[in-house]
Image: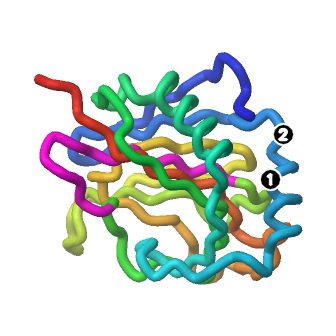
Amino acid sequence: MFNARPYVQTIALPGGHHCLVVDNALAEPERWRTLASKHAAQFFVDPHAGYPVRRLELPGPVLTAMDVFFSETFRDRMGFRRVVHGQGWLSLATAAAATPSRASSSGSGQGIGVMSLCLFDDPGLGGMVFPASLFPGDEPPLRVEARYNRLMVFDGASWHAPDIPASGVLADDPAQGRLSLDARFTCRRRLA
């Protein structure tokens, strides 16, 4: 599913976190757009996502492959020691986020690793934005631009949101819209 031996770029985020970026992450990215188009009628509105989105839940074998890639490539770099639970979706954004959010809180000694992979060609549909805080006047937010088949992995404790410009043209068709392959892994944090 993922390309072997990925080159991982590290981008420092506000608050001491970082975003790990891999270009050309999937071996066959077009396969996922085709799959999303085939199942477009099964996408559902996810009211808990933190931004307006329709999603298609990933089957167990796909989530397992993402878990293995996350664990082998990113988990240790993010200060996590093991995955406790995972969720994954094909996601189709329907509007820009009203405000950035954090991943749902996890238990004591836990954190959430977030993976988001761009499956759209138009970089104008936006990458990810990471503000230092939600207060106006603080330092400008850091932006990681979108690229087709670009994977962004970060700690869900960072404020984040899809960086969809107000003028962005979003489509209901997965072949044309802001389609991403997303996963969240609840992990135990490494002991200090």
Q: Which residue in the rendered view is the most extreme toward the top?
A: 5
Question: Hey, what amino acid is under mark 1?
Answer: Trp
In percent of the image, x 22 and y 26: which residue is there?
Answer: 190
Count residues near mark 1 (Cα–Cα under 10 Å), then give few for <14, some for 14-19, many for 20+: some
The residue segment tinted magenta is 104-118
Inter-mark Cα distance, 2 to 1: 8 Å
Q: Viewer-proximal residue, 78 or 186?
A: 186
Residue 57, relative to residue 108: is it above or below? Answer: below
Colouring chosen for the image of the structure: rainbow
Queried whether the magenta region covers residue 131, the answer comes back as no
Majority SS type along the magenta span? strand
Q: How far across and down, in percent of the image, does residue 33 sit?
A: 82, 58
Query: Residue drawn at (69%, 35%), measured in percent from left and top?
Result: 25
- Give the numbered dot on residue 28: 2
Query: In the shown orientation, is residue 151 left or right of residue 189?
Result: right
What residue do we see at 40% from left, 53% from top?
142
Secondary structure at numbered mark 2? loop
Across and down, in percent, residue 172 comes to 76, 81
Q: Position of residue 165 (x, y in %)?
A: 57, 74
Q: Nearer the viewer, residue 144 or 85?
A: 85
Q: Name the residue tied to disc 1.
A: 32
